[in-house]
Amino acid sequence: GQNIDQPTEMTATEGAIVQINCTYQTSGFNGLFWYQQHAGEAPTFLSYNVLDGLEEKGRFSSFLSRSKGYSYLLLKELQMKDSASYLCAVMDSNYQLIWGAGTKLIIKP
Amino acid sequence: SQTIHQWPATLVQPVGSPLSLECTVEGTSNPNLYWYRQAAGRGLQLLFYSVGIGQISSEVPQNLSASRPQDRQFILSSKKLLLSDSGFYLCAWSVGTGHTGELFFGEGSRLTVL
């Protein structure tokens, strides 16, 4: 079966750096996505990786290793507004998105 | 610019009652449209997707149905709700599969079935 694993919850301190990991097992691979979802709101797109390596976008970076079935989202200079759930999703060979359950990130002052 | 709206935002329905959630997209033509359900502690579950008017693909057999009467309108329905239908329903659109696949979500509809 297809599976996306990511930690359920993480806690970090304002101003610090946090890395949220995602491992996947899917039938084919056409890209990996990270979305941010604040409580009670819809997810919003953060990043897309289809090739190995690091994609940087401001305070957020996303890394992909296709051979290891692994990705991480790196958040730097954490702010209180970064408190949210972070969803990892993989597009399989049928171009369907397979979603992880999300990682709830709690930022403490 | 493109926008997506879905409504109602919140509803409480008794078991056995009907359901209709509506979603409309503006500012784009022939979008791919999706209905997802999000249960607490679980990943987004794709319910239906549509690549064009009248074309609906169902991913999960259940008592829900979807229709696309117009290019930018997507409706999620049920004739008789079950307790298990409670959840957060999200409509989304994309410019097309095989593209980057980035999804743009509506505000969400929280359904509580009592």
Image (spheres, coloured by chain):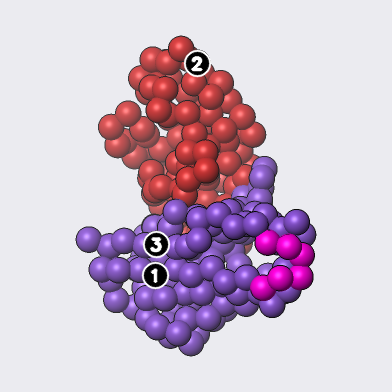
Identify the disc placed on residue A108: 2
Vertical arrangement, residue B66 with respect to residue A11, above or below: below
Nearest the camera: A41 or A44? A41
B7 to A46, vertically: above or below: below
Chain label for disc 1: B
Spatial distance from mark 3 to mark 2, Cα to Cα?
33 Å
Q: Earlier in the sequence, mark 1 or mark 3?
A: 3
Q: Is residue A49 left or right of residue A56?
A: right
Graded by Cα atoms within 10 Å as few (under 14), some (14 to 19) or many (20 or more), the crowding at tag 2 reads: few
Disc 1 versus disc 2: nearer the observer: 1
Chain corresponding to purple in the figure: B
- In the picture provided, is A56 more to the left or to the right than B69? left
Residue at position x 37%, y 34% in the image: A61
As drawn, the label of residue B5 is: 3
Query: Is the same chain shared between marks 3 and 2?
Result: no
Image coords of residue B84 (percent x, y): 75, 59
Indicate the position of residue A16 as horizontal and vertical percent values. Answer: 42, 15
The answer to whether marks 1 and 3 mark residues whose Cβ atoms lie closer than 8 Å is yes
Q: Residue at x 30, y 68 (%)?
A: B26
Q: Image quadrant for the N terminus of chain A?
A: bottom right
Image mark count: 3
Residue type, numbered disc 1 = Thr
Q: Colour of chain A?
A: red
Q: Is residue A4 visible?
A: no
Which of B111 and A36 lies nearest the eye of the viewer? B111
Amino acid, disc 3: His
